[in-house]
Image (spheres, helix red, strand yellow):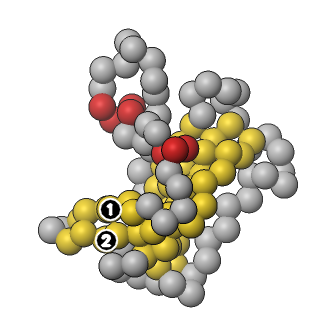
Amino acid sequence: VHYPTTSLLGENGTMLLFGHSSYLPIVYNPNYKAFNGIQKLRPGQIISVYAGGTEYRYAVTGVRSVNLAKADESIVELPSDKQYLTLITCDSFASKSDRFVVTAVLVQ
């Protein structure tokens, strides 16, 4: 899900996308597993986003776990000087307020 008011593909700024992650064996809908494993991404790895026949390639700059109940951890920066991508999903194994946040910058 694209977060309203954040940048679109091809625009300077940060595009913020939310997605589900679930490792439960009873979950069969792939939409609920779209962001499975994002916590395993490492800086420099490439994330591809496709739209309208165009591929946008972003290099991961950071991966962190945050607790939304803690104000100092819940801040997600939205820089606007280049084209950025931020992915956010739940941490299925912790509390409902825990999230994984991946940041990346456009490379191609």
Compare marks 2 and 1 and give the one earlier in the sequence: 1
Residue 4: in sight, yes or no?
no
Task: Tell me if 23 is positioned left or right of 88 in this view.
Answer: left
Identify the residue at horizontal 41%, vertical 51% (top origin).
1
Choose between 37 and 9: the one closer to the eye: 37
Q: Which mark is residue 56?
A: 2
**Mark 1 element type:** strand
Q: Height in image: 49 above or below 98?
A: below
Q: Dots 2 and 1: beta carbons under 8 Å? A: yes
Residue 48 disc label: 1
Residue drawn 45% across the image and 18% down it: 24
* Residue at 83 percent of width and 51 percent of height: 71
**Residue 80 appears at what percent x and percent y?**
57, 82
Disc 2 and disc 1: Cα gap in Å?
6 Å
Residue 97 visible: yes
Dot 2 alpha-carbon crowd within 10 angstroms: few under 14, some 14 to 19, many 20 or more: some
Total marks placed: 2
In the picture as drawn, the residue positioned furthest to the bottom comes out as 81
Instruction: Locate residue 56, reporting x and y percent.
Output: 31, 71
Q: Amino acid at mark 1?
A: Ser
Q: Nearer the viewer, residue 16 or 105?
A: 105
The disc label shown at residue 83, or none: none
User: What amino acid does circle 2 point to?
Assistant: Tyr
Q: Quadrant of the C terminus?
A: bottom left
As drawn, which residue projects farthest toward the top? Answer: 26
- Measured as percent of width and height from the top left, residue 104 is found at 51, 67
Picture coordinates of residue 46 (x, y %)? 39, 63
In this rendering, the answer to whether 101 lies above or below 61 is above
SS class of the residue under badge 2?
strand
Residue visible at 67% across and 68% down?
Answer: 77
